[in-house]
Image (cartoon, helix red, strand yellow):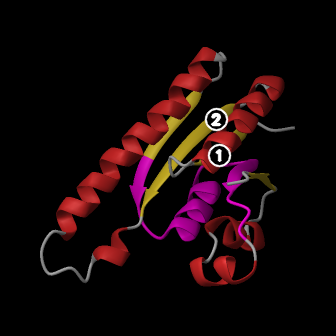
Amino acid sequence: MYDQILVPTDGSPAADAAIEHAIDLASRYDARVHALYVVDGSAYSTLEAGAEIVVEALESEGEEAIERVSKAAEEAGVEVVSSVVNGTAYRTIREYVEDNGIDLVVMGTHGRQGLDRYLLGSVTERVVRTSDVPVLTVRHEE
C-alpha cells in the first residue's frame, strides 16, 4: 500500500511522535522513509546582519533532527533517505512529495486550537489541505 513515506521534522516532540508512526508503518509495509527538514530562512531575511548565521544554525539543527530519524529507522531495519532543504515549509513539503513519488506523509501537530492556531499558522494544516496524497497527523499534547 505504501512504498515511500515522508516524515517532515522540525526536531520538536510533536515531530518525534510522528516519526514513531512513520517508522512503524514503513516496517509493516516494507516502505522507505524520507526524513525532511525544511529551513525557512525567509523570516530572518530582514536582519541587517546575522541572517546567514541564523540560517546556518537552522541547517545544523536540521541535520541533527534528521539524524534522529535516520538512527531510529536504521534500528528498526527501515531504509531511510534524509534531506535538509531551504524553502517555505509547506510548499517545499508538497514539492518533495511530487518529486519523490511519496505515497503517505506523516506529520506531527501541536494540537493548538483557537487563537493560537490562527496566529501561529500550521504547516501541517496547509499540507493536509493541499496534498494530493494521504496525510496522517499525529497529535502531540503539550
Q: Is residue 5 visible?
A: no
Residue 90, image x, y percentages? 58, 68
Under mark 1, the amino acid is Leu
Q: Secondary structure at mark 2?
A: strand
Q: Secondary structure at mark 1?
A: strand
The answer to if 89 sits in the magenta stretch is: yes
Occupied quadrant, residue 125: bottom right
Q: State if disc 2 and disc 1 touch (CB < 8 Å).
A: yes
Judge whether residue 70 can be spotted in this image.
yes
71 is higher (above) or lower (below) than 121: above
Between the C-alphas of marks 1 and 2, the distance is: 6 Å
**Residue 125, label in figure:** none
Which image quadrant: the C terminus? bottom right
Q: Residue furthest front?
A: 142
Q: How many marks?
A: 2
Give the residue displayed 36% in from the left and 75% down from the top.
42
Residue topped by disc 1 = 6
| Amino acid type, label 2 | Val
Q: Residue at x 74, y 62 (%)?
A: 111
| Residue 72, magenta (yes or no) | no
Residue 7 placed where, x, y %?
63, 45
Query: What is the residue that sits farthest to the left in this orientation?
Result: 49
Q: Label 2 belongs to which residue?
A: 33
Which region is colored magenta?
84-112
